[in-house]
Image: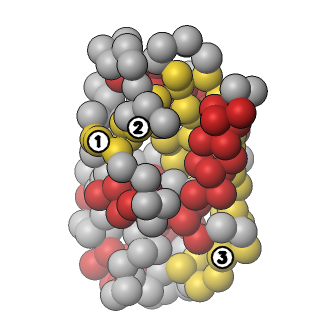
Amino acid sequence: MRPLILASASPQRKKLLKELRIPFKIVPSKVDENSKETNPRKLVAQLSLKKAEEVARKRPHCLVLGADTVVWCAGKILGKPEDKNDAKRILGGLNGKWHRVYTGVALVDAQTGKAWKEVAVSRVKARKLPDEDIERLSAKHMDKAGAYAVQDKDDPFIEKIVGAYDNVVGLPLTSVRRLLKRVARGR
């Protein structure tokens, strides 16, 4: 297999991808994540593909994996918070509620220009926390969609996950495995 590149600087994605025991390098994409797309499934599919394509243009003999994650609650896409007040608003809106986490993954074969993509979805229930806990947590995860990090053992926010845990963290490995198999088969 040709060299694999992860087009993300996320330490969580790096850690998850290592579980596949496939050698890879990290080359973060510089794609602008702002979009007018309001459908979470379409948004993560588009952004993951844009990220992979942007890195693939500079690495012509590689396979490039891009990923993007958003949280969907009450008909709204929730990305990364802009600041602590935005994080507090996001966490307050999720507090005690079910929501969905969408992660798009795209694999681009830079040599042929072919691209494969998938979207994983998990349902997540946030624990109902008092305002002082929301205040404390609001400064903690400014770089995460939904302003929380389920992988942090001391993060009490998430009560239940229906679907893939690694999807909620930001890289659904089942989807990544399927994409790599498709590339290996040439489909």
Question: Nearer the N terminus, badge 2 or badge 3?
Answer: 2
What label sits on residue 41 in the rendered view? Answer: none
Q: Nearer the viewer, residue 163 or 72?
A: 163
Between marks 2 and 3 in the image, the one whose residue lies nearer the viewer: 2
141 relative to 115, above or below: below
| Crowding at mark 2 (Cα within 10 Å: few <14, some 14-19, many 20+) | many
What label sits on residue 4 in the rendered view? Answer: 2
| Crowding at mark 3 (Cα within 10 Å: few <14, some 14-19, many 20+) | some
Mark 3 — residue?
A: 161
Asked whether residue 73 is in view, the answer is no
What amino acid is labelled 3 in the image? Ile
Residue 96: quarter of image: bottom right
Badge 3 element: strand
Give me the residue at 29% from left, 42% from top: 25
* Number of marks drawn: 3
Badge 2 element: strand
Give me the residue at 58% from left, 77% from top: 126
Snapshot colouring: secondary structure
Q: Nearer the viewer, residue 4 or 81?
A: 4
Location of the C terminus by quadrant is: top right
Mark 1 — residue?
A: 25
Mark 2–mark 3 Cα distance, whole angstroms, equals: 30 Å
Between marks 3 and 1 in the image, the one whose residue lies nearer the viewer: 1
What amino acid is labelled 2 in the image? Leu
Q: Nearer the viewer, residue 90 or 148?
A: 148
Badge 1 element: strand
Mark 3 touches mark 1? (CB < 8 Å): no
What amino acid is labelled 1 in the image? Lys
Give me the residue at 59% from left, 56% from top: 172
